Amino acid sequence: MYVTTWLYIDCICDSQLNFVPVVRSSDADVTFQSIDKVRFHVYKKDLATFSGGFPPAELVSSDLEIIDLPERAVVLDIVFSFTRPQRYPDIHDLKIETLFELAEAAEKYEVYNVIILCKTVIRMKTLTYPLQVLRYASRNGYGDLADDACPLLLGTPLLDIFELRMPERYLGAWVSRLYEQ
């Protein structure tokens, strides 16, 4: 279970009796809302300093505007924790689905310190999750990760590989390794 790193937290109970963090800060100047309706009040200056992909401050018309994001609260909580000058959370023990969601969100919002950390942790999971690693690598242009995953997938049905919709350069590498065997 992930424990939030935010300082201003209340908890509400959802219908499955899970506790959901609601981030509150009296002087934050932008509000984001996750797909599961959790609001994150953050600082534009932190987003500008630590990321390159969130909506720029000048696009937010008022401090009361809420910007909807398609990611789950647990993912955004971790991403936003990396946009504050604080100790960062340890992501090594995240559920694999959450790790890949976090990695994709980090890429999308250009939170570079999360990107490199996710890539490092994902590399450590290659033996266990080679298909997911190859999908992530091919989506984001990480040839080194794709190279690590390809040999582990030589017995994988071709249809499963095609469903990844990999760029041709990665698909070609996988096929050439298949024929090297």
Image (cartoon, grey):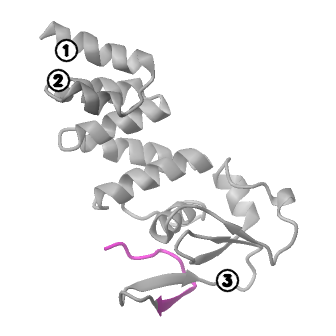
Point out the tag, 3 or 1, that comes first from the N-terminus: 3
> Type of residue at label 3?
Ser
* Vertical placement of residue 170 versus 89, above or below: above
Q: Confirm or deny contact between disc 2 and disc 1 (CB under 8 A).
A: yes
> Dot 3: within a 10 Å radius of its alpha carbon, few (fewer than 14), some, or many (20 or more) residues?
some
Quarter of the rendering containing residue 8: bottom right
69 or 99, which is in the foreground? 69
Write the residue at 58% across / 50% down.
111
Quarter of the rendering containing residue 177: top left
Residue 81 screen position, x and y as percent: 53, 66
Write the residue at 75% across / 62% down.
45
Tag 1 residue: 178
Write the residue at 32% across / 15% down.
173
> Type of residue at label 2?
Leu
Residues rendered magenta in the picture: 1-12
Residue 1 screen position, x and y as percent: 31, 74
Tag 3 residue: 25
The disc at residue 154 is 2
> Dot 1: within a 10 Å radius of its alpha carbon, few (fewer than 14), some, or many (20 or more) residues?
some
Does residue 159 show up magenta in the picture?
A: no
> Type of residue at label 1?
Leu
Between circles 3 and 2, the one closer to the viewer is 2
Q: Regarding mark 2 in the picture, which secondary structure is present there?
A: loop
